[in-house]
Amino acid sequence: MMWWIGALLILLVPAAILGMILHDDARAERARPPMGWVRRLWRGAGKDRRRHPRHLASIPLTYRVLAPNAAPSEAVTRDLSLGGIGMLLSEKLLPGTELELRLQGAPAGPLVVRGAVRWVREMPPQPGEARRLFWAGLELLATTAITQQQLQAILDRLTTSNGRPDA
């Protein structure tokens, strides 16, 4: 009669140990961070998330930091869209800095818009160039319908003139 208790113990003890191991593995699986966000990020890598298409453009502009006693400075655009401007400048601006921009090349004369710096990168030094250059991405702020029309007129001219609004 005692033999069946021994046989039962021989079968139940390994089953109990295996159950504890599997239970711990399931708990460890739940403790791992979900990988779904990594997959979503990877699928979106390389995609342009801009709301408006950008156009390569080299347009001279002057800008002024919106601060008391700020002097205007010269720059040139690198690209342009209805929602933002990429520009090359010789000073490093901090993200969040608000600027007043005066773009040349609008059909009705210089176009004045406001923008906020979203990012800044230093450009690699060019041979024979002593000054440092920075590439800044700006988001245009509070554009009116008239400003949007003027920007669209510049963009229309860019598409027909190979990136030069005065051509």
Image: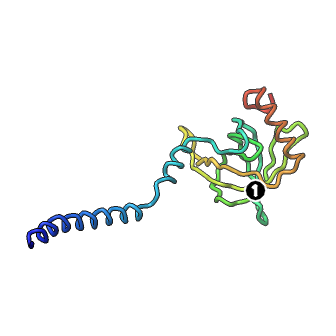
Residue at the location (73% across, 31% down)? 163
Measuring from the top left, give residue 59's x and y in whole percent: 75, 38
For residue 2, side relative to residue 143 (left or right): left
Give amino acid for label 1: Leu
Measuring from the top left, give residue 111's x and y in whole percent: 85, 45
Quadrant in which the N terminus appears: bottom left
Residue at the location (65% across, 49% down)? 136
Measuring from the top left, give residue 95's x and y in whole percent: 65, 58
Furthest residue toward bottom: 2
Q: Which residue is mark 1?
A: 99
Residue at the location (68% across, 40% down)? 78
For residue 84, side relative to residue 123 (left or right): right
- How are the residues colored? rainbow
* Above/below status of 81 relative to 30: above
Quadrant in which the C terminus appears: top right
For residue 27, side relative to residue 2 (left or right): right
Residue 105 found in image quarter: top right
* Above/below status of 29 relative to 87: below
Tag 1 secondary structure: strand
Q: In the rendered picture of this protein, how many numbered marks are placed on residues?
A: 1
Residue 4 found in image quarter: bottom left
Residue 22 found in image quarter: bottom left
For residue 129, side relative to residue 7 (left or right): right
Residue at the location (70% across, 60% down)? 97
At label 1, counting other C-alpha atoms closer than 10 Å, the crowd grade (few under 14, some 14-19, many 20 or more) is many
